Amino acid sequence: MSDPWRLDGRVALVIGAGRGLGRGCAIELARAGARVVLVARTEAELQDAAAEAGGEAVAITADVTEPSEVRRVVDAAGELGDLRVLVAAAGTNRPGPARDYPVADWDLLFNLNVRATFLACQAFGGSLLTRGASGSIVTMSSQMGSVGYPGRVAYCASKHAVDGMTRALAVEWARAAIRVNAVAPTFVETPLTREWLEDPQFRAEVVERRLPTGALAQVEDVARAVRYLACDASSSVTGHVLRVDGGWTAW
């Protein structure tokens, strides 16, 4: 019997792989034996991430909010081998009070956090359905997809949407042997969160008050959860939101 934790012989497509969580996920899937296709908008970051992933990793620059670009990426990944794994990790955040939150920022978050995630799932799922192949989709949610938080009305709304999308796709595609799950991390020190976490007051609020563990998650913690959902080790898991949140949502 093959090792259920390995991805040898499979191609894994990681959207938003230039830095942060997406980069960590791509590297972890490469360690699991997958040939990884890394996608982001910034060429320099992407090439550096692909080099760290090593092996036969491939970097493709694309705007994943555009349907034609997403289809191009999925087609290119499919030409490289047995495309069976998608990690949709593209995302961003712009905090601000709801009373005067800019509509432009709201649109930006939903365009990347929700639209890009759906387009990637749609194109990848369509490829699997056309081929009659099984596969695993992992979306990137957040503990903010389960709770509210002041100053994060758009981010919370977008991640609640990702959770709902994940469950709906899981139900729709389950009989086709396509699993769809989400990983929902707490705050992780990445380029996206570093500025906020450098504020001592905010860091204390997060680490000392909100996190029962008293510790931020690491990129590797999230990446290993993604690997579990991508591999056959989780073959009976679909429609699940796996929280890697240090107990944040257990309060």
Image (spheres, helix red, strand yellow):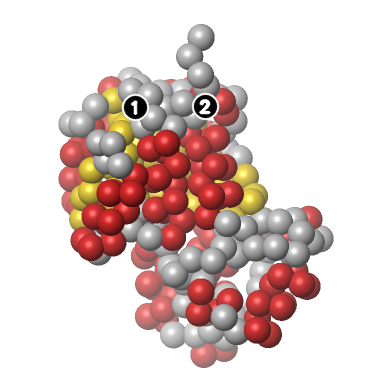
1 and 2 marks in contact (CB < 8 Å): no
Q: Residues within 10 Å of mark 1 (few under 14, many from 20)?
A: some
Taking 204 as reference, is 129 left or right? left
User: In the image shown, does 139 or 54 lie closer to the viewer?
Assistant: 54
Identified at 53% across, 84% down, the residue is 96
Residue 196 place in picture, x, y as percent: 55, 79
Q: Is residue 249 visible?
A: no
Q: Quadrant of residue 250?
A: bottom right
Question: Tag on residue 10?
Answer: 1
Which residue is found at the position 31% from the left and 34% from the top? Answer: 35
Can you tell which quarter of the image residue 53 is in?
A: top left
Q: Amino acid at mark 1?
A: Arg
Q: Nearer the viewer, residue 103 or 20?
A: 20
* Rendered residue at 38%/60% (across/down): 19
Tell me the amino acid under the disc marked 2: Trp
Q: CA distance from mark 1 to mark 2?
A: 12 Å
Q: Is residue 120 left or right of residue 222?
A: left
Residue 38, label in figure: none
In x, y percent, where is residue 74? 25, 40
Q: Is residue 25 above or below residue 34?
A: below
Numbered disc 2: secondary structure: loop
Name, please, the residue furthest toward the bottom.
Answer: 100
User: Which quadrant is the C terminus positioned in?
Assistant: bottom right
Picture coordinates of residue 200 (x, y %)? 65, 84
Residue 191 visible, this angle:
yes
Q: Assess disc 2: are there few (<14), some (14-19) or many (≥20) residues with their C-alpha within 10 Å of its C-alpha.
A: some
- Who is closer to the viewer here, 221 or 161? 221
Q: Which residue is under mark 2?
A: 5
The mark nearer the N terminus, 1 or 2, is: 2
In the current view of this chain or complex, which residue is farthest to the top?
1
Residue at disc 1, secondary structure: strand
